[in-house]
Image (cartoon, helix red, strand yellow):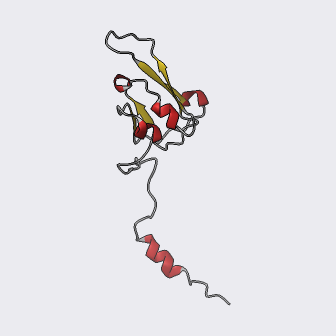
Amino acid sequence: MKIPLRALPEVIKNLFSKPATIKYPAVKAEVFDAFRGRIVFTQSECIGCDMCVRVCPAKAIKIIPSEQTHAEKKIFDCLMDLNHCIFCGACADACPKNALESSQDFELAQLDKTKLKLHYK
């Protein structure tokens, strides 16, 4: 026959110890510096070389000419489909002008898939 109160010492020990879990989402989760979250596009840096498009394994990014005009240089927009993006950061690594970079934003869950298609202007 098993001892009825065998677990009592373990219960008492855990009553007074610090919890092993975090209080997310009530407390914002901390991410490390090299975290690869949502990709951020800086339009003024983009030269339209399409290196990011070539290296993207998920084909989640497109660079298109912008509707805006600028006298000195061509301006490009970025279409990103976060529904397809695997957040590998290859596009940010391949960009010669650092127009793309990984942010620490990871809370991207949506019920509407159209909100995951971003048009950076």
Task: List the single residue furthest toward the bottom.
Answer: 1
Task: List the single residue furthest toward the right.
Answer: 1
Identify the residue at horizontal 39%, vertical 15% (top origin).
Answer: 74
Residue 13 lies, in percent from the top left, at: 44, 76
Residue 10 lies, in percent from the top left, at: 49, 78
Nearest the viewer among 95 and 107 is: 95
The answer to whether residue 41 is above or below residue 85 is: above
Nearest the viewer among 96 and 78 is: 96
Identify the residue at horizontal 35%, vertical 49% (top origin).
Answer: 33
- Which quarter of the image is occupied by the C terminus? top left
Callout count: 0
Task: List the single residue furthest toward the left.
Answer: 72
Residue 117 lies, in percent from the top left, at: 54, 28
Identify the residue at horizontal 41%, vertical 11% (top origin).
Answer: 68
The answer to whether residue 74 is above or below residue 33 is: above
Q: Is residue 113 visible?
A: yes
Identify the residue at horizontal 45%, vertical 71% (top origin).
Answer: 15
Q: Is residue 121 visible?
A: no
The answer to whether residue 16 is above or below residue 91 is: below
The answer to whether residue 118 is above or below residue 68 is: below
- Which quarter of the image is occupied by the N terminus? bottom right
Nearest the viewer among 93 and 100 is: 93
Q: Is residue 90 left or right of residue 4?
A: left
